[in-house]
Amino acid sequence: MVSTPAEQQRLSDLTRLRRVRDRIDREYAQPLDVERLARDAHLSAGHLSRQFKAAYGESVYAYLMTRRIERAMALLRIGELSVTEVCFAVGCSSLGTFSTRFTELVGMPPSAYRQEMAEVSEGMPSFIEKQVTRPIRNREAAASASQLA
């Protein structure tokens, strides 16, 4: 089956987007920005942003922050690092931004999350803990709550 140039371009773009997503998953703690990711993927920043959102349903920045917050949640559950140390360990450079994004995704500040998880997760198997504690954006939580009602 012969594919058209448009189909070939679409497949090429999807491959690049997957590589960008995989890089974010691997290098979430590194300083990453859309311009650098786009340049390394041989795309313009605007094209990467539009295509990434179309393919994955969220912006590059939102995806990166979700990965960082997921890792931060795991580090906070372990409880060996302070909130500030966790913030920097996951690649955030501002404690204020980290706390704001964490609260948006998780529904509570990092310090409250650490305290609650210390009480709840005692003895919980890690595979269940990971599933139960996956971050959900507030708007997604509101949407699922309204669907359940």
Image (spheres, rainbow, N blue to C red):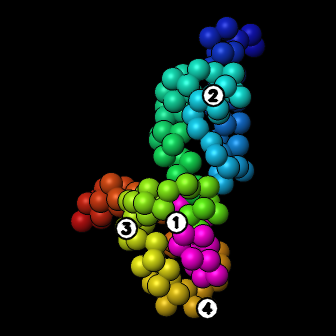
Q: Which residue is mark 1?
A: 134
Secondary structure of residue under mark 2: helix
Q: Which residue is mark 2?
A: 38
Characterize the magenta stretch by its predominant secondary structure.
helix
Whichever of callouts 3 and 2 sits on the residue coming sooner in the sequence is 2
For the C terminus, the image quarter is bottom left
Magenta stretch in the rendered image: 69-85
Vertical order, 69 against 32 (above or below): below
Residue 125, by quadrant, is bottom right
Vertical order, 25 against 114 (above or below): above
Q: Which residue is mark 4?
A: 123
**The one of 60 and 131 positioned closer to us in this rendering:** 60
Secondary structure of residue under mark 1: loop
Separation (CA) of disc 1 from disc 3: 12 Å
Separation (CA) of disc 2 from disc 4: 43 Å
Whichever of callouts 2 and 4 sits on the residue coming sooner in the sequence is 2
- Closer mark to the observer between disc 3 and disc 2: 2
Whichever of callouts 1 and 3 sits on the residue coming sooner in the sequence is 3
Left or right? Give the position of 32 relative to 109. Answer: right
